[in-house]
Image (tube, rainbow, N blue to C red):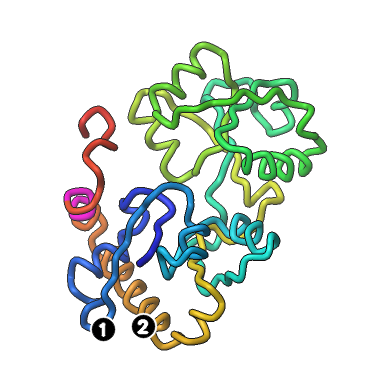
């Protein structure tokens, strides 16, 4: 059981394609990927999942509180978080964000903002944080257009595309270029599980890598396959 960090999508294409092809089963692995909310660490700690996927800094946070967890592989070499602004925004460099309204979805984002802002000599108190409750693209775009927010934190490889598809182009400042230089999503388990099941985890990683290599051979084909087989239909943008 793998607790994903988001809904089954092309973010996990290597794993999902390998699962569809039966490659895990060939290695004696009965894989069950699922997303049940942002409780990835808690699900592994409680035993509801053997493997979790989460941002490296979030795993560090949980370990610091005493959890016996350990990351054993990284999916992203860089953290995909980035500060997004409208393409025509007066924020041309990150320093220009001073005095602007900045969206905040969850408290964990304050740390990322703190590090990125510090890189350009700013503090959290130099911006105005605006609590935002909806992740829906149209809702966020409306906040931009209504001048209620000037920037937000989002993943740089999908949100800019999503905004562009909705007719609202944006620019972004990568967190990895502004001091937040952690691995992105990592795979983690309980320490004793890793010790006891090294062979299993090695096979899991090799099959996952095989899946990604297959995806890279024909990205368009496998994107469609993953979307058709795995992505929740209620997550589509305007039915697409």
Q: Nearer the viewer, residue 53 or 68?
A: 68
Q: Position of residue 139 (x, y in %)?
A: 42, 22
Residue at point 39%, 29% (across, down): 136
Dot 1 and dot 2 residues touching (CB under 8 Å): yes
| Residue at image coords 35%, 58% | 12
Q: Earlier in the sequence, mark 1 or mark 2?
A: 1
Q: Is residue 3 left or right of residue 186?
A: left
Q: Which residues are magenta?
A: 224-228
Q: Position of residue 14 (x, y in %)?
A: 32, 65
Q: Quadrant of the N terminus?
A: bottom left
**From the viewer's perspective, is residue 231 above or below residue 198?**
above
Near-viewer residue (219 or 236): 236
Magenta stretch contains residue 176: no
Asked where in the image residue 168 lies, by quadrant, the reply is: top left
Between marks 1 and 2 in the image, the one whose residue lies nearer the viewer = 1
Q: Residue at x 45, y 22 (%)?
A: 141
Residue in the foreground of this view, choosing between 28 and 140: 28
Spot occupied by residue 86 in the image (x, y as percentages of width and height): 52, 24
CA gap, disc 1 to disc 2?
A: 9 Å
Mark 2 secondary-structure assignment: helix
Horizontal side, residue 135 vs residue 7: left or right: right
> Mark on residue 28?
1
Quarter of the image with the C terminus is top left
Vertical side of 228 occupied by 131: above or below: above
Residue 127's tag is none
* 232 sits left or right of 125 in the view: left
Question: Label 1's element?
Answer: loop
- The disc at residue 203 is 2
């Amino acid at each position: 059981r793998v607790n994903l960090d988001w809904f089954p999508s092309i973010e996990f294409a290597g794993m999902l394609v390998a699962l569809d092809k039966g490659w895990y089963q060939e290695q004696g692995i009965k894989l069950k990927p699922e997303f049940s909310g942002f409780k990835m660490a808690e699900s592994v700690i409680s035993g509801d999942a053997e493997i979790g996927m989460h941002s490296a800094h979030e795993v560090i946070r949980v370990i610091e509180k005493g959890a016996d967890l350990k990351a054993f592989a990284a999916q992203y070499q860089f953290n995909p978080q980035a500060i997004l602004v409208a393409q025509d925004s007066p924020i041309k460099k990150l320093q220009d964000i001073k005095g602007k309204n900045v969206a905040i979805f969850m408290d964990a984002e304050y740390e990322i903002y703190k590090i990125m802002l510090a890189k350009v000599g700013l503090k959290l108190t130099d911006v105005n944080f605006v609590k935002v409750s909806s992740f829906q693209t149209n809702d966020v775009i409306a906040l931009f257009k209504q001048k209620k927010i000037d920037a937000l934190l989002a993943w740089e490889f999908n949100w800019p595309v999503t905004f562009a598809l909705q007719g609202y182009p944006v620019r972004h400042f990568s967190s990895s270029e502004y001091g937040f230089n952690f691995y992105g999503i990592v795979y983690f388990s309980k320490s004793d599980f890793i010790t006891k099941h090294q062979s299993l985890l090695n096979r899991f990683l090799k099959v996952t890598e095989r899946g990604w290599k297959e995806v890279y051979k024909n990205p368009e084909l496998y994107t469609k396959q993953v979307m058709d087989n795995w992505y929740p239909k209620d997550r589509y943008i305007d039915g697409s």
